[in-house]
């Protein structure tokens, strides 16, 4: 490049950078979205928030009493329900807590509020007064705001509110005064003057009136001692622990009002090498801990985790060695549910889904009772009941009801599982009533129930063989168990009432149903709109929700007294979306399976003209049919449907179903069939100017498709795999696992392992066919991406470089998988549009010059 050309290019780069960052959208300040935020427990007061997408200063709130608007205000501060008739809003700029009374339409203000904790259940506010540096606890009623307790910050050593917001713990700097507890339910105070050692962190029990008082700061779990404090009896035990430098503790959990367990991690000995200089990866190490932890060159010891259980009532300490390195869930004082996530040499599942035996451990008798062996993917195949009476597990399409108290399988039923290829409704439904009388699950697309009292199964919603999904709205927010994400625990917030969102997968219609024991009431009949933001009163007699569709922004409705009324309309100018049009395209894959695609029309559509089309690929996409989208350059993948429509592109979202031919070939054939059908259905599509885009797994599909067909004139892929053999045998830092699990039991859904059918993997690997690419492709990724390693993209680039194929790769140094930095989001969205504009619209401008410059080979430099 000569000096003159170089100067011109530098000026061009500066211009492009400026134009990208300064990009705006016409009428952008008019785009808003309604959020159905709050409904009081008695169902009388509802709050709706209006958020302006591109100007938060114009945000507003609307408050309704029995469906009638009583107050509105322009504010971008959040309002939260305080009690049936009061709302709170915290002004972070003025440090003011506003109390709004829906009866009097009057606002009271508490000034100088910092670090506020709102406790609506007991009408309390706890905060630090920034004016006099005092902690304060205030009781708020409709008549007054009353101070319950206060003390200077300088007088306080430690202060904390329990997780359930029922207790306030205070320790003053004069620690010889002991500790003080305020019961936030009845405001009674308890003082224990005997606890006189400094507190730096606490752990509150979920089940019992117990606090663990710890002498080390948050994050430091090397306790020389701890204090087990029962605030119900105002008694305590100070427990001395191993204070060696190589011992630390975690998972403190009370097992009764007088007992607890913890996990003690300690050193077995130094590793047989210097971890700072060497990484040792051993196939005999089922933890792969050398790969995960020791590769950081920080730890040089081999460690073991062991349980220690303290029983103060019986004056016993248990240290069961047979459950070393097990994870455990406390069921009662004498029983633990235990498992070892790394029990088997099997990495064909992700870290949390690996097979493991799940057992009951009897503390007193030191015995293990196996419930299920080699249970795979426990989060999707198990369920623990609220009172620990039952453990449900699914194996080989049989659902087992295991009675924990009797140590036996109480009942079984053969089930037909949902098709989990629909990722937006991927998790199985397994939910308990609070008294664990009923267990709810899905089989054959029917909502079913097991009655633990009568020991029978029944269908409570018959889908009539329609492929249905169910979303239970009224779930309890808290669990009494310290379960991790590997096991499933969920219950409803009321004993026998279920508020159900039902989805028909075939036509993407939804309904809202209330099930009260055996009585079924339809709140909202089958609708093509998407139902969201569902709120309900304690008695379920009042329900508010939002409806939207691709051509209708969110509108909020209220169901009360057995009928439905409009609560608040969007009022967004209809000219912003009234032009929206879509068509559902039906087609079949190579094996005759019915599929669907969504065709979105250009904004200024004229049937007499031809328009380019961009095809977006990513597995099943039909659920996007009824989602209202907004045009914006702030996109974490660079792709925005409405923005492209505004620029007069068709946008097509075809469904892709993986089959025995492998994930790449499945995508190719599904997309080819979808394109064939959409071109027949809509003649205004310019079949000579079709582009394709995909991100993550969709980027892999895009990479593969362009190696096999020339139907696309341009392509863009972001953060996608190119060499699936390399990926299969790679270690994934994002999942902390060998990545072949994704191909055998994950998203890639390959029907065989690599050793069983090497040819299958080779046929589906884009890197092997880069010499066949005729489609100009732009690829991008973040250099911090550990989900799909960014090297996959560089190798794809090298493949095209080897064969002199025009190609541009973008590597963003400070991004991971999906872009989070605003400037990068705008940049990649703009570049995607530039790319398609240049190749599909022949747009040769200053904005697209970088595309032309970087994809044009100088003929005199080419070697024949």
Image (cartoon, rainbow, N blue to C red):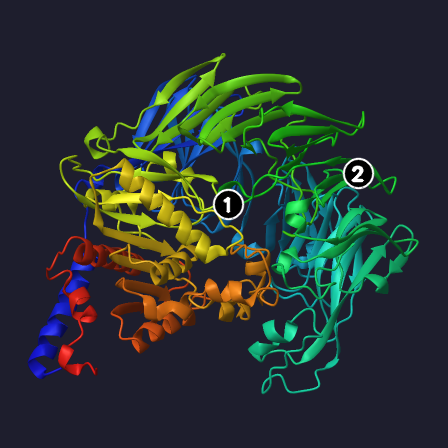
Indicate which disc residue 820 carries. Answer: none
Which quadrant of the rendered structure holds the N terminus? bottom left
Q: Position of residue 790 (x, y in %)?
A: 41, 69
Residue that carries the numbered disc 2 in the rendered image: 389
Q: Position of residue 598 (x, y in %)?
A: 35, 39
Q: Please give left or right for residue 771 compared with residue 453 in the image.
A: left
- Residue at 20%, 70% (x, y): give it: 854
Viewer-proximal residue among 446 and 25: 446
Eyeballing the image, is 850 above or below 630?
A: below
Q: Secondary structure at mark 1?
A: helix
Residue neighbourhood size for the residue with mark 1, other residues' Cα within 10 Å, grouped as few (<14), some (14–19), many (≥20): few
Residue that carries the numbered disc 1 in the rendered image: 423
Eyeballing the image, is 697 above or below 673?
A: below
Any part of residue 319 in sight: no
- Residue at 49%, 12% (x, y): give it: 561
Which quadrant of the rendered structure holds the C terminus? bottom left
- Residue at 31%, 34% (x, y): give it: 583
Viewer-proximal residue among 631 and 179: 631
N-terminal of the pair, mark 1 or mark 2, is 2
Residue neighbourhood size for the residue with mark 2, other residues' Cα within 10 Å, grouped as few (<14), some (14–19), many (≥20): some
Q: Position of residue 550 (x, y in %)?
A: 32, 34
Question: Residue 232 is drawn in which quadrant?
Answer: top right
Q: Secondary structure at mark 2?
A: loop
Callout in the foreground (1, 2): 1
Q: Position of residue 823 (x, y in %)?
A: 27, 60
Q: Are marks 1 and 2 in contact (CB under 8 Å)?
A: no
């Amino acid at each position: 490049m000569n000096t003159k050309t170089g100067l011109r290019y530098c000026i061009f780069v500066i211009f492009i950078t400026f134009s990208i960052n300064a990009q705006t959208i016409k009428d952008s300040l008019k785009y808003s979205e309604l959020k159905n935020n709050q409904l009081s427990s008695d169902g009388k007061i509802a709050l709706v928030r209006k958020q302006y997408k591109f100007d938060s200063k114009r945000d507003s709130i609307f408050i309704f009493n029995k469906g009638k608007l009583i107050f509105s205000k322009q504010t971008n501060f959040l309002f939260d329900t305080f009690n049936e008739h009061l709302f709170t809003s915290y002004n972070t700029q003025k440090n003011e807590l506003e109390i709004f009374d829906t009866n009097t339409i009057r606002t009271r203000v508490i000034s100088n509020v910092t670090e506020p904790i709102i406790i609506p259940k007991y009408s309390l506010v706890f905060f630090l007064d920034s004016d006099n540096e005092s902690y304060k606890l205030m009781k708020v009623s409709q008549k007054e705001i009353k101070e319950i307790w206060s003390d200077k910050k300088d007088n306080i050593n430690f202060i904390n509110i329990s997780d359930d917001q029922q207790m306030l713990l205070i320790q003053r700097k004069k620690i010889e005064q002991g500790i003080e507890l305020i019961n936030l339910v009845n405001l009674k105070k308890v003082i224990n003057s005997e606890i006189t050692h400094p507190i730096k962190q606490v752990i509150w029990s979920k089940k019992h009136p117990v606090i663990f008082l710890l002498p080390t700061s948050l994050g430091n779990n090397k306790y020389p001692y701890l204090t087990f404090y029962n605030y119900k009896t105002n008694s305590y035990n100070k427990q001395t622990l191993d204070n060696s430098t190589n011992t630390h503790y975690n998972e403190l959990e009370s097992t009764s009002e007088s007992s607890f367990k913890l996990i003690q991690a300690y050193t077995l000995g130094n590793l047989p090498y210097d971890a700072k200089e060497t990484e040792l990866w051993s196939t005999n190490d089922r933890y792969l801990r050398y790969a995960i932890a020791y590769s950081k060159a920080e730890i040089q010891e081999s460690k073991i985790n062991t349980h220690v259980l303290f029983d103060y009532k019986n004056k016993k300490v248990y240290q069961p060695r047979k459950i070393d390195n097990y994870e455990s869930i406390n069921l009662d004082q004498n029983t633990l549910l235990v498992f070892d996530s790394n029990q088997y040499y099997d990495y064909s599942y992700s870290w949390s889904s690996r097979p493991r035996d799940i057992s009951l451990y009897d503390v007193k008798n030191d015995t293990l009772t196996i419930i299920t062996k080699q249970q795979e993917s426990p989060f999707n195949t198990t369920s623990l009941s609220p009172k620990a009476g039952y453990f449900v597990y699914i194996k080989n399409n049989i659902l087992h009801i295991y009675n924990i108290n009797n140590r036996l399988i109480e009942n079984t039923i053969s089930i037909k599982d949902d098709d989990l290829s629909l990722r937006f409704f991927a998790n199985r439904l397994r939910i308990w009533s609070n008294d664990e009388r009923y267990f709810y699950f899905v089989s054959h697309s029917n909502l079913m129930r097991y009655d633990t009292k009568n020991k029978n199964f029944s269908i409570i919603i018959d889908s009539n063989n329609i492929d249905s999904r169910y979303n239970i709205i009224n779930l309890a927010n808290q669990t009494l168990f310290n379960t991790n994400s590997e096991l499933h625990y969920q219950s409803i917030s009321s004993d026998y009432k279920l508020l159900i969102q039902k989805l028909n997968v075939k036509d993407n219609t939804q309904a809202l149903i209330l099930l009260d024991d055996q009585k079924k009431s339809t709140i909202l009949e089958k609708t093509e709109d998407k139902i969201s933001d569902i709120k309900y009163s304690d008695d379920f007699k009042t329900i508010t929700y939002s409806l939207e569709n691709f051509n209708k922004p969110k509108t909020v409705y209220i169901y009360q007294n057995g009928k439905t009324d409009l609560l608040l309309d969007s009022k967004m100018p209809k000219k912003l979306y009234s032009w929206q049009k879509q068509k559902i395209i039906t087609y079949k894959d190579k094996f005759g399976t019915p599929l669907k695609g969504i065709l979105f029309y250009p904004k200024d559509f004229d049937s007499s003209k031809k328009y380019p089309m961009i095809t977006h690929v990513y597995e099943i996409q039909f659920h996007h049919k009824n989602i209202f989208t907004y045009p914006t350059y702030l996109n974490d993948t660079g792709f925005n449907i409405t923005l492209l429509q505004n620029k007069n592109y068709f946008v097509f979202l075809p469904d892709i179903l993986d089959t025995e031919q492998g994930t790449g070939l499945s995508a190719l054939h599904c997309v080819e069939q979808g394109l064939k059908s959409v071109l027949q259905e809509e003649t205004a599509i310019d079949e000579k100017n079709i582009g394709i885009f995909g991100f993550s797994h969709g980027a892999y599909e895009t990479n593969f498709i362009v190696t096999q067909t020339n139907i696309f004139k341009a392509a863009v892929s972001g953060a996608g795999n190119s060499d699936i053999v390399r990926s299969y045998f790679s270690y994934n830092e994002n999942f902390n696992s060998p990545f072949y699990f994704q191909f055998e039991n994950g998203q890639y859904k390959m029907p065989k392992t690599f050793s069983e059918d090497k040819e299958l993997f080779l046929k589906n690997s884009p890197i092997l066919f880069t010499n066949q690419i005729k489609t100009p492709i732009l690829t991008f990724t973040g250099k911090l991406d550990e989900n799909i390693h960014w090297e996959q993209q560089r190798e794809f680039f090298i493949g095209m470089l080897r064969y002199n194929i025009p190609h541009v790769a973008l590597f963003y140094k400070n991004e991971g998988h999906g872009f989070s930095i605003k400037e990068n989001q705008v940049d990649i969205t703009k570049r995607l549009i530039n790319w398609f504009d240049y190749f599909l619209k022949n747009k040769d401008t200053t904005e697209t010059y970088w595309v032309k410059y970087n994809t044009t080979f100088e003929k005199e430099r080419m070697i024949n």
